[in-house]
């Protein structure tokens, strides 16, 4: 569980509500159904128009990473790679067949399969890098969906404000209806700017960090498998891969 994500949402929204209360306002003044429908519905509609279904579905699945990110246990992975190297030196590459069948990660399993099949290091690297790049691009596109929502929300909020003012102008002769129109106008702007800067954009950037962390872990796996294919000493492999532990983007 990513506690910072929860704290961030609570602090951000809490600061707005507390500031409103200290300024003499009340929470009820920020609750407006029409403004909510305009901003959320308009933002969602524009986003659906921009992105294909596959990206949208992927973004929904990835949104869970904000609170429950996929852990990248680089230390544990390095230990596994060193173990594979030691086994390969003792029993040959075919000795990794049992390891390959027990590996749950499909990317790692594919790398071990290429290794056991006796492919040249460059062939292994090219094959795995294609898959790594494709996966990274797919997930970055999904993260950009939230970035797009962060761009649309403030603009839709302004549209909601203009619609509210139009409603006000249409009812100048009926003072009782002016309050609702003005409230929708200003609250729609707040909804648009607040959701963009407190939710959509932070979520997009956090997801990008998780995507980069996953790519880093796969880069390390590639380097480890290539080192095994080239017959490097297990100790040297461990020293080489330990450099990945210093990256600040890993989870």
Image: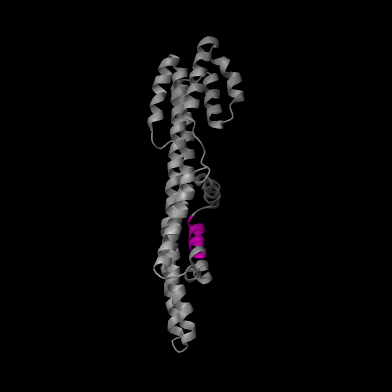
Q: Which stretch appears magenta?
A: 41-50
Q: Is residue 121 magenta?
A: no
Q: Is residue 173 visible?
A: yes
The prevailing secondary structure element of the residues shown in magenta is helix
Q: What residue sits 47% from the left and 31% below the top?
A: 218
Name the spot of residue 191 as percent of width and height, x first: 45, 64
- Residue lying furthest bottom: 173
Q: Is residue 48 above or below residue 62?
A: below
**Residue 143: x percent and y percent?**
46, 48
Q: List x then y, in percent, for residue 227.
A: 44, 19
The answer to whether residue 152 of the structure is visible from this angle is no
- State left or right for residue 117 relative to residue 126: right
* Residue visible at 54% across and 46% down in the picture: 64
Query: Residue shown at 40%/63% (left/top)?
Result: 19
Q: Residue at x 52, y 38 (%)?
A: 70
Residue 43 magenta-highlighted: yes
Q: From what the image shows, is residue 228 above or below residue 127?
A: above
């Amino acid at each position: 569980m990513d506690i910072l994500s929860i704290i961030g949402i609570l602090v951000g929204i809490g600061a707005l509500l507390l500031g409103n209360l200290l300024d003499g306002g009340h929470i009820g003044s920020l609750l407006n159904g029409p403004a909510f429908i305009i901003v959320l519905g308009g933002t969602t509609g524009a986003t659906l128009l921009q992105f294909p279904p596959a990206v949208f579905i992927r973004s929904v699945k990835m949104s869970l990473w904000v609170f429950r990110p996929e852990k990248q246990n680089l230390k544990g992975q390095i230990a596994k790679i060193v173990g594979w190297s030691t086994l390969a030196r003792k029993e040959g590459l075919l000795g990794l067949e049992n390891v390959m069948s027990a590996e749950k990660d499909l990317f790692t399993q594919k790398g071990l399969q290429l290794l056991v099949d006796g492919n040249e290091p460059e062939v292994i690297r090219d094959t795995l890098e294609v898959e790594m790049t494709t996966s990274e691009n797919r997930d970055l596109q999904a993260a950009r969906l939230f970035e797009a929502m962060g761009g649309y929300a403030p603009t839709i909020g302004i549209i909601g404000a203009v619609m509210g003012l139009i409603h006000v102008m249409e009812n100048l002769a009926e003072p009782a209806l002016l309050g609702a129109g003005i409230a929708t106008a200003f609250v729609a702007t707040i909804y648009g700017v607040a959701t963009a800067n407190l939710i959509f954009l932070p979520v997009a950037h956090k997801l990008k960090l998780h995507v980069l962390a996953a790519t880093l872990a796969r880069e390390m796996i590639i380097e480890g498998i290539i080192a095994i294919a080239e017959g490097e000493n297990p100790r040297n492999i461990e020293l080489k891969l330990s450099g990945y532990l210093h990256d600040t983007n890993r989870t």
